[in-house]
Image (cartoon, grey):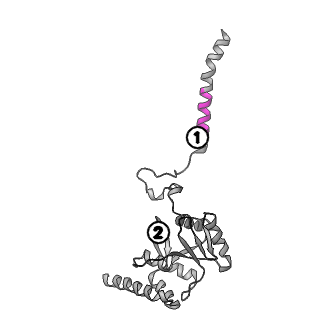
Amino acid sequence: MTTKLKHENKPKRLAKSVSKNKKRARSGRTRKSSLRAQPGRDAGRAVADERNISPLIRLVGAFRAENIQFQLIGMSAAVLQGVPVITNDIDFWLDLPARQYMRAVNLARRLGAKMVRNTIVELTDGTLVNYIYEVTGLKDFAVEFRRAKKINFHGLTIPVMPLESIRKSKMAVMRPKDEAHIYYINEILRLRKKAK
């Protein structure tokens, strides 16, 4: 009879023990803030499913994780500001000495990119990214970084070179394609002035 009672009480004691352990485990493992969007909160701050994040945004995140300052420049920056042209690549001016180009390349390669040239990588979706370390006709990175606009780019706010600086750099280089680019940049700047 006593052995029967012992066996009958055992499941109850186990349930109490498991319940206490669950409470202890939960209290130590709760997060201060959830990674998922909460009702009534800004969903833009939630961490997206990694499969839905573009390779370009992963690269921007990698720059930030490695504390590499950057700004979007060239015609990709101009397009973001309304200039009606098409560009084949994305230009990032990095605050790194040119001799450290492999640091930026390896960062992209860890994300699955291929090295095309020592300053160009191809991301997993085929996007070409050109790393720039010095821009002709402009001041150094720190000065131009302070002038950069903060613009939404694929859901992130990033520093983007203003049109006036893009035009200045293109005028300093003046390749055959730059003349057309300067024309379109001037048109957008003229329309902005007119709208004021």
Q: Quadrant of the C terminus?
A: bottom left
Amino acid found under the numbered disc labelled 2:
Phe
Residue 128 horizontal/vertical position (percent): 54, 72
Q: Nearer the viewer, mark 2 or mark 1?
A: 2
Image x and y of residue 73, in percent? 51, 78
Which amino acid, by three-letter code, is at mark 1? Arg
Q: Viewed as shown, does residue 73 lie left or right of 67?
A: left
Q: Which residues are magenta?
A: 15-27
Taking the view exactly as shown, the residue that stands out farthest to the top is 1
Q: Is residue 86 above or below residue 153?
A: below
Relative to 55, residue 9 above or below: above
**Mark linked to residue 153:** 2
The foreground one among 78 and 35 is: 78
Which residue is rendered at x = 31% and y = 81% of the image? 195
Q: Which residue is mark 1?
A: 26
What is the distance, in whole Å, between disc 2 and disc 1 at their CAs? Answer: 38 Å
Residue 22 lies in the magenta stretch: yes
Q: Quadrant of residue 143?
A: bottom right
Q: Is residue 88 in sight in this rendering?
A: yes
Q: Residues within 10 Å of mark 2 (few under 14, many from 20)?
A: some
Prevailing secondary structure of the magenta residues: helix
Q: Position of residue 94 (x, y in %)?
A: 59, 76
Residue at 52 percent of width and 56 percent of height: 51
Q: Secondary structure at mark 2?
A: strand
* Magenta-drawn stretch contains 186: no
Numbered circles on residues, count = 2
